[in-house]
Image (cartoon, helix red, strand yellow):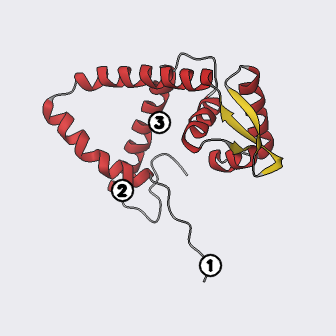
Amino acid sequence: MPATAVPATGSPAESSTADRLRFSVTRLARLLRQQSDAALTPTQLAALATLHRCGPIPVGTLADLEQVAAPTATKVVEKLHGAGLVDRLTDPADRRVSLVALTAAGETLLGEIRARKTAWLNTQLDDLSPDDLTRLVDALEVLERLTAPRAQKTPA
């Protein structure tokens, strides 16, 4: 579809809003990634964050949560394990299952990266006028709803 075409299901105003939001969110994500200052890929950083949030989990669960193929998750875990950022553990409930968990070094690195990103973002927010900052805070609830995981529909 040409860049100027409007999808059949949306008005020009809706398309413009979606385009502006997509562009802004993509640019902000790129700028935040640049603040990580770590020799890790975005996929590796996302895996660390998921392991921090979800605790020790099997590689297959990590793949599902990160929406990547199991072989991709396995490669990511191998790289992170080689860097000393994750450990492989035996599941106490089923010794046949291997779990992946953050190491202390992984927790520390993730905390440092998050602190750098937050500091950079705080610097950017400091440049906003009080009115713009209020408008941004008001928009956060909408953005959080927009990006919240959606419950999967169960078949009838």
Q: Is residue 114 above or below residue 137?
A: above
Give how far apart the Cα atoms at labels 1 and 2 are: 31 Å
Which corner quadrant of the image does residue 155 belong to?
bottom right
Q: In the depicted view, which residue is nearer to us: 21 or 134? A: 134
* C-beta proximity under 8 Å, tags 1 and 3: no
| Circle on res. 31 | none
| Disc 3, SS | helix
Give how far apart the Cα atoms at labels 3 and 2 are: 18 Å
**Label 1: which residue?**
155
Foreground: disc 1 or disc 2: 1
Q: In the depicted view, which residue is nearer to us: 118 or 52? A: 52
Q: Residues within 10 Å of mark 1 (few under 14, many from 20)?
A: few
Amino acid type indicated by mark 1:
Pro
Q: Residues within 10 Å of mark 3 (few under 14, many from 20)?
A: few
**Label 2: which residue?**
14
Q: In the depicted view, which residue is nearer to us: 19 or 39? A: 39
Residue lying furthest front:
92
Residue 151 coordinates in the image, percent (x, y): 52, 64
Amino acid type indicated by mark 2:
Glu
| Disc 2, SS | helix
**Label 3: which residue?**
26
Q: Residue at x 74, y 43 (%)?
A: 59
Query: Mark 1 or mark 2: which comes first in sequence?
Result: 2
Q: In the depicted view, which residue is nearer to us: 74 or 95? A: 95
Q: Is residue 103 left or right of residue 149?
A: right
Q: Residue at x 30, y 19 (%)?
A: 123
Amino acid type indicated by mark 3:
Thr
Q: Residue at x 14, y 31 (%)?
A: 130
